[in-house]
Amino acid sequence: MPEIRGVFFDLYGTLLCYGDMEAAGESWYHAIRRELIDNGHAFDEGTLVRLCEEFLLQPEPPVQDDGLTVYERRMRVLVGELSLELEVEELRLLSEASIAAWHAYTQLDPEAKSVLGELQGRYKLALISNFDHPPHVHQLLDELALRPFFDAVVVSGDVGVKKPDPAIFAPALEQTGLATDEALFIGDSPEDDIAGARAARLRPVLIRRLLGADGSPPAWTKDGVRVVTGLREVIGLVG
């Protein structure tokens, strides 16, 4: 088996830890409601609740040459269902406020920077994230001082494809100059991260922070995927 020369990471749920995501969803809804009210828009409260509950269940809006992100297009559909039409700048502010409210319930893994620092220079590092509003991810990488660690940053909203589609891994492999079997990919979602990495022929690693009933999670899943309970364990996988 080829030597590991690269370590690629997912963002949310991997480098960033989730907190109380039920509260995050409530905060997200209230941020949307507050922004609309503060800007003088009248709407039916019950309809807003329903639209927010269905927000990510709706088909992705078609790509248009409108300069909007996927998330902003989704938000434009939502406000349209409320019989509202927002200017682009107001739509962007609404999107940013709602994402910030949701993001407040996540935090950077305390081990993230030290682990990335130990890997940097020895391995090519990449971030591959499913996220519909790339400006948030890029701003976050700067605010958390994470960007200097990475040789490649790939956000689904920038490249137009999402995990588990294996095509999302291609830009990171190209920018790092690695073959598929030379890179690990660490992610928290079996359906998106692990399935996508397998389809792209990277070596998948599942991060599962919650312990099992016996307090000792398996080192491998039933279908042969390596499992780690924290980022520091990644160091041991690459030597």
Image (cartoon, rainbow, N blue to C red):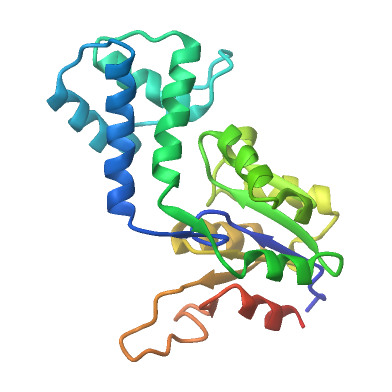
Q: Residue at the spot x=53%, y=63% of the render?
A: 194
Viewer-side residue, 123 vs 196 = 123
Q: Is residue 137 left or right of residue 21?
A: right
**Is 140 on the left-hand or right-hand side of 117?**
left
In which image quadrant can residue 5 be found? bottom right
Q: Quadrant of the N terminus?
A: bottom right
| Residue extending farthest front | 38
Q: How many marks?
A: 0
Q: Residue at x 54, y 45 (%)?
A: 130
Q: 236 or 196: which is nearer to us?
A: 236
Q: Residue at x 86, y 54 (%)?
A: 177
Q: Is residue 54 visible?
A: no
- Of 168 and 13, which appears nearest the observer? 13
Report whether 145 appears left or right of 84.
right
Q: Is residue 69 visible?
A: yes
- The quarter holding residue 31 reads top left
Picture coordinates of residue 44, whole percent (x, y): 15, 18
Q: Quadrant of the C terminus?
A: bottom right
Is 105 rendered above or below residue 52?
below
Q: Residue at x 34, y 22 (%)?
A: 35
Residue 163 position within the rendered picture, expressed as x and y whole percent measured from the top left: 54, 49
What percent of the width, then of the height, locates residue 191?
44, 59
Is residue 183 shown left or right of residue 199?
right
Whether residue 185 is situated above or below residue 236 in the rendered picture: above
Q: Nearer the viewer, residue 82 or 93?
A: 93
In the rendering, at what x and y percent does residue 151 appear?
A: 80, 52
